[in-house]
Image (spheres, rainbow, N blue to C red):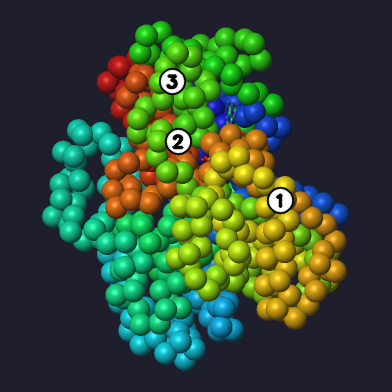
Amino acid sequence: MQKALIIGGGIGGLAVALRLKKAGLNVTLFEKNPTIGGKMGEIRSKGFRFDTGPSLFTLPELSDELFELFDKNPRDYFTYTKLDNSCRYFFHDGTVVNAWADIDRFSDEAYEVLGEPKNNLKKYLKRYRKLYQTASPVFLFNAFQRWKNFAKKEFRGMLFHLHELDSLYTMHRRNKKAFQSPHMVQIFDRYATYNGSDPFRAPATLNMIAHLEHNLGAYFPDEGIRSIALSMEKLAIEEGIEIKTNSSIKKILHDGNKVTGIVCDGKEMNADIIISDADVRTIYMNLFEGIRPPKSIINKELSSSALIFYWGVDFNSSLDVHNILFAKDYQSEFKAIFKDKILYHDPTIYIFISKKVVKTDAPEGCENWFVMLNVPANHNHDWEKLRNDARMYIQKKIDKLLNVNIREHILTENIADPVTIERNTSSFRGALYGNSSNSLFAAFNRHANFSSQFKNLWFTGGSVHPGGGIPLCIASARIVADEVKTYINKGEF
Ligand SMILES: Cc1cc2nc3c(=O)[nH]c(=O)nc-3n(C[C@H](O)[C@H](O)[C@H](O)COP(=O)(O)OP(=O)(O)OC[C@H]3O[C@@H](n4cnc5c(N)ncnc54)[C@H](O)[C@@H]3O)c2cc1C
């Protein structure tokens, strides 16, 4: 039985562990932290519970599939509910728009509040549904960088639809053509931030993300986002996967161009297969001796990072689960993040309140606020100062919106910034999604799920193909597992 070692217990690492176990391999997963989950972490403080990273859950069927592989009912492990309102948007001029799950209701609201012709939203979502259906089999569920895959039926089919990929337009340019209201353009431009990118430079192909949320639905787990990772860990243990926490891998061993094992706690362990769920840049830079990281990852622009305040507040607000308080000038905000690499003075603020769904996440009469700004990845910024500046910008905007003095209502505060994100998850400079997608050829630029330098080494998770976010990390695990199975069947080991 082949022995597979997995570095990192984020969602991608857990998903690939399950798939390889199902394929009959002997699987051990190493996580440097005391608990699994990676970015899908949790903070508990004074009766409040906060999910530390992801908050929006789409394509739940991809997580469910992992349980179904073992003939288990996913609902025995975790449950989730579709949200009626995927997000409440607040604009600088006082306009408020709800992105209702029911498309007719969303179209009606966009018409009534913004004057957006009703058919525009439907036309837009239809376009990106079609694009997703064409592109996802090739881009999301295949090792797209393997030339031999181009012989597959779905790849050949794709060749006739290349013009539909919309990769010659930026997201913003396409959205400006699609909608009359600048507010609708801003709502749909925001999807670039779902993989840490800039809508004024990222390809319109990424408008597909809106399809996931609006056509397929935004969901929320009934016990919070972290319950997804915990339920996968439970299944993994039941199925005999060995999970070693507090186990930091210090080195990947190789013999010529073939990886052979790892070093953990000063001990060497042999392996037939090594799969990394950690940031691919960190792995190449820190775990190999005497090699140069591949050109495909260095000198590329990083995705954005985040500055997050986890506030326990002592009142029930009129906000929804997901709320956005937009910057007035979105283009200047992205210029500040990616070009000037500074904190923008009028930042778009995201407020996520899981208490609206999970009643036990805050004491009675209180709410757990996750208040996040997009910021540049760390380039030796003075984060102490920037935290204080950000707190001031945020409080000013919230005070005006809710007519409160929010400072007087905060019972507990924890903060994450790019430095703490890097420390906790090993993401290079705290960038949330590896490299950014700020180029029209972004999909072609991501690091592959396999190593071209080393045999028997694969990569899963948000820093590699097909990208960041819960569903894509799970998709990357599927690609890796399919590759490994093909290798085994061919007797390549
Ligand atoms: C603030 C924030 C908001 C987000 N919002 C959303 C959202 O709303 N929806 C969504 O779908 N996605 C969102 N994401 C993205 C999503 O959380 C990530 O893409 C996904 O969780 C990353 O999973 P991963 O498998 O890449 O591993 P990670 O979560 O990055 O975990 C990697 C693990 O590897 C471990 N590790 C690293 N090096 C070593 C080593 N040498 N030895 C042992 N272990 C090691 C780390 O400790 C870590 O646990 C968000 C992320 C953040 C941070």
Q: Residue at x 31, y 27 (%)?
A: 486
Ligand 1 falls in quadrant? top right
**Left or right of residue 233: residue 118:** left
For marks 3 and 2 on the same chain, the one whose residue lies earlier in the sequence: 3
Q: What residue is disc 3 on?
A: 273
- Is disc 2's CB within 8 Å of ligand 1? yes
Q: Residues within 10 Å of mark 3 (few under 14, many from 20)?
A: many
Residue 460, numbered label: 2
Q: Is residue 205 left or right of residue 305?
A: left
Identity, as a three-letter code, of the amino acid under mark 3: Ile
Marks 3 and 2, how far apart at CA: 13 Å
Ligand 1 is within 8 Å of the C-beta of the residue at disc 3: no
Q: Is residue 333 above or below residue 24?
A: below
Mark 2 to mark 1 CA distance (whole Å): 35 Å
Instruction: Give the quadrant of residue 229.
Output: top right
Q: Residue at x 62, y 44 (%)?
A: 381
SS state under label 3: strand
The circle drawn on residue 385 is 1
Residue 287, position in %: x, y?
A: 52, 20
